[in-house]
């Protein structure tokens, strides 16, 4: 059976180009995981979780740096989590929280923008 016949019968295997929601959902799950891990890292003063959040936020940062609105500023957001991890190691919790707030605001703004499209 050819691909065209399978497409006509509705028996197409799940592929990224046929179902962009698969990529979209994985992307948002990674962002939510980064936010949740960073909050847990700030509460329990675990810098490893903040470093992991910075790594998880890299796809969002690369996506944003490709848009005209953010250009290279999109790459700053994972660095904010990495800076928060360094500040947690140096026992400066409130400064670490203040460095994380712009990332939370960015994620909230993106959620709002996507929801109201």
Image (spheres, rainbow, N blue to C red):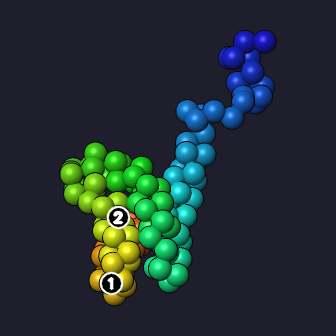
What residue appears at the point 57 percent right and 59 percent down from the top-left corner?
Answer: 29
Q: In 3D space, how far apart are the residues under numbered discs 1 and 2 (Cα atoms)?
A: 14 Å
Say whether residue 11 is left or right of residue 23. Answer: right
Relative height, residue 47 to residue 10 (above, below): below
Residue 25 in percent (x, y) is at: 58, 53
Q: Is residue 105 visible?
A: no
Q: In percent of the image, x 77 and y 28: which residue is there?
A: 11
Displayed quadrant of residue 3: top right
The residue that appears at 53% across and 72% down in the rendered structure is 36
Question: In the shown orientation, is residue 71 left or right of residue 3?
Answer: left
Residue 105 against residue 52 in the figure, above or below: below
Name the residue nearer the viewer: 42 or 34: 42
Mark 2, residue position? 82
For residue 38, above or below residue 59 = below
Q: Secondary structure at mark 1?
A: loop
Residue count near mark 1 (Cα–Cα under 10 Å), binned few <14, some 14–19, many ≥20: some
Can I make out residue 14 in this image? Answer: yes
Q: Nearer the viewer, mark 1 or mark 2?
A: 1
Local SS, label 2 = helix
Q: Please state the horizontal and vertical placement of residue 103, each as a whole percent of the image.
A: 35, 70
In the image, what residue occupies the spot 44% across and 70% down?
47
Image quadrant holding the N terminus, namely top right
| Residue 92, numbered label | 1
Residue 29 left/right relative to 74: right
State the residue in front, 46 or 5. Answer: 46
């Amino acid at each position: 059976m050819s691909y065209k016949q399978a497409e006509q019968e509705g028996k197409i295997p799940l592929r990224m180009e046929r179902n962009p929601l698969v990529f979209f959902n994985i992307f948002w799950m990674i962002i939510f995981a980064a936010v949740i891990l960073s909050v847990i890292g700030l509460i329990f003063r675990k810098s490893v979780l903040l470093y992991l959040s910075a790594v998880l936020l890299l796809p969002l940062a690369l996506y944003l740096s490709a848009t005209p609105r953010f250009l290279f500023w999109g790459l700053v957001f994972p660095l904010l989590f990495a800076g928060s991890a360094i500040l947690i190691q140096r026992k400066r919790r409130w400064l670490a929280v203040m460095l994380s707030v712009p990332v939370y605001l960015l994620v909230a703004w993106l959620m709002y923008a996507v929801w109201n499209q």
